Image: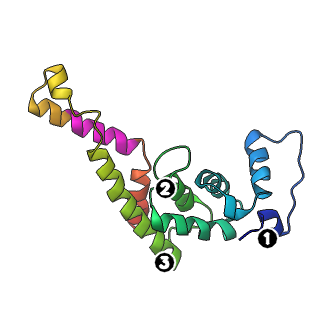
Amino acid sequence: MSKTLEELENDYWEVSENDTNLIRKCMRLRKKTITSFSIEELRILISQNIGLKYLIPKAIIILEADPIASGDFYEGDLLKAVINCCDVNKDTENELNTQLINFCKKAMFQLEANMLNDDTWENSSEDYGLTLQDSDASRKARIDELRESSPYIEFVEFSKQ
């Protein structure tokens, strides 16, 4: 799609002096061709429920290749934006929700694998004179912390449908 959201929707927004930085950024993005959007730009517009009819299909293509595709925040922030947008009715069985549930399951698997490979706890037992039990407890605490700071829990909740 080499058109802009403004062209596709035939809707041209007026700039106001009271607009926030986020609104100004969204207005600039509406003038940019959809094919040139970065993951972060998609995440921003989808999070603001802008142009969903055109942007969700583009996000789905990205998520098929990488369920934890990320913009500027954290792994999985694009998927989180999509599952939280107003076009996704979590209580409805449809093809989009089925795809998103599958993406959430894959994302959870990848996030867990990344958490287990996180080397921040690797040398804790040697560096701090901890026993193996202490090291395991430290690792579990670190994994729990990572789960809390990522969209992991939201993916779990969404995939329970």
Of badges 1 and 3, nearer the viewer stands 1
Q: Earlier in the sequence, mark 3 or mark 2?
A: 2
Callout 1–callout 3 Cβ contact below 8 Å: no
- Tell me how many marks there are: 3
Residue at (60% x, 67% y) in the render: 58
**Helix, strand or loop at mark 1:** helix
Tell me the residue that label 1 is attached to. 8
- Kindly report the distance in space between the C-alpha atoms of the residues bearing marks 2 and 1: 26 Å
Say whether disc 1 or disc 3 marks the residue closer to the N-terminus: 1
Q: Which span is picked out in magenta?
A: 138-148
- The amino acid on which the numbered mark 2 sits, given as a three-letter code, is Ala
Quarter of the picture holding the C terminus: bottom left
Q: Quadrant of residue 105?
A: bottom left
Q: Are marks 2 and 1 in contact (CB under 8 Å)?
A: no
Along the viewing direction, whichever of 118 and 21 lies nearer the viewer = 118
Estimate the spatial distance between the alpha carbons at disc 3 and disc 2, rounded to whole Å.
24 Å
What residue is shown with label 3?
Answer: 93
Query: Is residue 127 a member of the stretch shown in magenta?
Result: no
Q: Residues within 10 Å of mark 2 (few under 14, many from 20)?
A: some
Whole-Å distance between the Cαs marked 1 and 3? 28 Å
- According to the image, label 2 marks what residue? 69
Badge 2 or badge 1: first in the primary sequence: 1
Which amino acid is tagged 1?
A: Leu
Quadrant of the rendered image containing residue 29: bottom right
What secondary structure predominates along the stretch shown in magenta?
helix
